[in-house]
Amino acid sequence: MSKTTALPGLTEFEREVYSWQTTVPGFGEEGQRRLKGATVMISRIGGLGGLVAFELAAAGVGRLVLAHGGNLKPSDLNRQLLMRHDAIGQVRIETAVQMLKGLNPRIEIFSVPENVSESNASELVAKSDLVVDCAPLFEERYAMNDACVRLSKPMVECAMFETEAHITSFAPGKTGCLRCLYPEKPDDWKRRFPVIGAVSGMVGCLGAMEAIKILTGLGQPLYKRLLNCDLRSMSFHSVNLKPIKDCKLCSKTVNY
């Protein structure tokens, strides 16, 4: 949320709930109030997005906008930690909302039982201060990216494959965008891919931390950097990202 927007206050109960993190230098009660006043959109609440939502709900973000279609399948259970075995066959996002409300009944949740598309991306992004992209399909990811650039909303980009994870953050006018990183959809990318559930959870926690940093001003977000993680060897390294000067979406907005 904007630093000029009036911040909500904290109740005594909230001060106790968040007392461990409000003692973090550079965060404090003001950081907690910024989280309470913020709205975060998360595309997909599966193995990756579910952990982002869970961590942000635990951290005290005030509102979540969630989008994910379909019913729960047995193959979801090894990594989608917002789900339950007894909810197999039920609408996935309804179970997710129940789990998040069980952890933090104070949180407001706007949920839609459908995936992000060009037809709904702008409406969903407009409701939010920040977007966390956890979608597996490039059509969804491009739709959110384009809406974020048009509406000047920051986006945390998370992805994983097998034992690898990748995360970066985009800020319209300051960095490039997803189309700079992936100008075209990879021809060999498929909806279903190999991944270990713990990898999804790890990058979900990193994505939640990126969102917290951007919303509160804590630390240095991954702007202009792509963090690559290989959990098979426990190696982590980052590479610098540069905007594409002829990007058809963001080239007119980036300060080179």
Image (cartoon, rainbow, N blue to C red):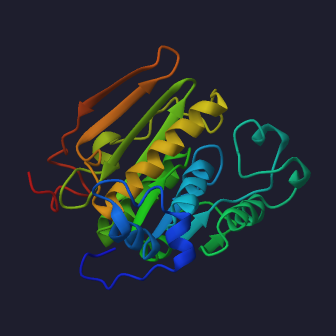
Residue 25 image point, x, y percent = 30, 54
Please state, as top left, top right, bottom left or bottom right, where the N terminus lies in the image. bottom left
Farthest left residue in view: 256
Residue 45 image point, x, y percent = 63, 54
Q: Is residue 240 left or right of residue 153?
A: left
Residue 168 image point, x, y percent = 35, 43
**In the depicted structure, whether residue 45 falls above or below residue 222:** below
**In the depicted structure, whether residue 130 falls above or below residue 109:** above
Query: Is residue 87 at least partly visible in the picture?
Result: yes
Q: Is residue 92 left or right of residue 29?
A: right
Count the numbered circles shown: 0
**In the depicted structure, whether residue 164 falls above or below residue 94:** above
Query: Is residue 116 at least partly visible in the picture?
Result: no
| Residue plotted at (28% across, 76% down) | 2
| Residue plotted at (65% across, 59% down) | 68
| Residue plotted at (64% across, 71% down) | 111
The residue lying toward the viewer, choosing from 195 and 138, is 195
| Residue plotted at (37% across, 61% down) | 146
The residue lying toward the viewer, choosing from 140 and 2, is 2
Farthest right residue in view: 86
Residue 64 image point, x, y percent = 55, 69
Farthest top residue in view: 233
Q: Is residue 47 left or right of residue 145?
A: right
Q: Is residue 56 left or right of residue 255?
A: right
